[in-house]
Image (tube, rainbow, N blue to C red):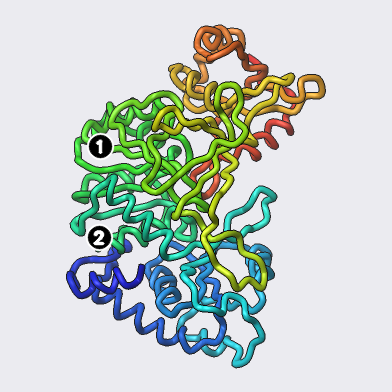
Amino acid sequence: MMKRIDDWQVKNAKQTAIIDGEESVTYRELEECVQERAKILAEIPQKVILAPMSNALDQLINFLALIRADKVAVPVNAGLSDEGLQDILNQFEAPLVLTDIRTISEKAAVLYDSAEYASPSDLAFIGFTSGTTGQPKGYLRTHQSWVKSFEGTNELMHQSSNQSATVFGSMHYSLSLYTLMQTLYFGQTFILNQHFSTNRLVALIKQTEALTCYLVPTMIHALVSKLEAQNELLTENYTIVSSGAKLNVEIRRKLYRYCPNVQLYEFYGSSETSYISMETVQGIPSDHSVGQLFPGVQLVIDQPNAEGVGEIQVRSPLNFAGHHRKGENHVATVACVSTGDLGKLAGKTLEYYGRKDDCINRGGEKFYPLEFERHLLKLAAVAEIVVLGIPDAHYNEKIGAVIVWSDHNQVMSLTEINTYLSSRMSRPAKIDNIFAVGSIPKQNNGKISRKQLLHDSAKERVPNVI
């Protein structure tokens, strides 16, 4: 990846590489800063170096310098608690934390005893997710897997050096780092943001030509809600790449209504697989569709049910190189990744039915929350909704709906909700309980935590049944 960035500082040295508010650097300036810091880092014996990442230009340069110095960069949230940081440090044999490039040499031990990731490899960095247990879980990402992903993106969405890209969310997240590295790989301008706000997003769209915005669905929903409330049209030509969760059809319709010239692409994938498929339809795709398979990707649908829905398993050169294990010194792309997602292939189209763990088992029948949500979001009374399984002694799980009403003076009863669903679901199904809330909490990356919602609803135990 860094070789391609080197090429751009020769070809187009004066082009802006990164913008951070009022501060910016050209490709030549970026190269000089990265080289200077990489020389310092190359003298340090430690191979594994944690890089605290806030949304600041200085820390992006540190991350790039670690890669240039052939270190194993471990990007972490700069706001991580001491306990959280220690949890990650404990997973390595001889890690170092990069807090200040000017003093890191003083903190580095002269001698250390570790062969962890000591052999030359294609390893670019080790990212951490919360994991299914809530404990940080490291995944290995190689240079070549992302380069192949960048080139696949170029096949589907032509990239040129006159474009700009922006992403919202902490820079230690996989999506944020991916956007940064892909933008620099194609010689484009990366626009850094401190946090997400619809005002900031709208301003960037209006001010920036040839802009691509990498967003999660909750951010697109927030943009659409703002435009709808103000009855405002965004007529600029720009691109949105949606990733992180399935984009609801109703949000798509509203986006096209208020942003008539937007180009919308929806990627499906994960930190472990990178991109799996891409929805390129400019309009309303078929229900559950997440598009056609990304170049080079092959799928296996494991243990499909009678409807053909099973767990999505991915064979791809874009896959990660496994999960980190203390003392590791072997890096190789994982041949097949089990995603934990449910889906099926309909011709050349991949259909997505949600997380395997989110599937609701009500009295032995399996129900997919996304199908309920897709239909109920069409109701004017429903602003936001999350459907989830509520533990039940008799049925194993009942079906609960956490709803934010559009107007608290115009709500629907449980009977009205189920009457509406009765003629729309693929088979007989109903909501058992409604939990009316003022807002649905989001994680720092903009995604919805069903586990947290289940915990909150369990605390109430008496649902707001209307």
* Front in this rendered view, residue 304 or 415: 304
Amino acid type, callout 1? Val
Rendered view: 198 above or below 425: below
**Residue 433: % across, % down:** 66, 19
Amino acid type, callout 2? Gln
Rendered view: 308 above or below 39: above
Within 10 Å of disc 1 (Cα), the crowding (few <14, some 14-19, many 20+) is some
Q: What is the quadrant of residue 430 in the picture?
A: top right
Q: Which residue is mark 2?
A: 188
Dot 1 falls on a residue whose secondary structure is: strand
Q: Give me the residue at 45% from left, 17% from top.
A: 379
Rendered view: 270 above or below 406: below
* Front in this rendered view, residue 36 or 258: 36
Within 10 Å of disc 2 (Cα), the crowding (few <14, some 14-19, many 20+) is many
Dot 2 falls on a residue whose secondary structure is: loop
Total numbered labels placed on residues in the image:
2
Alpha carbon distance from label 2 to label 1: 20 Å
Please give the label number shown on residue 262: 1
Rendered view: 164 above or below 126: above
Q: What is the quadrant of residue 179 in the picture?
A: bottom left
**Residue 111: % across, % down:** 62, 91
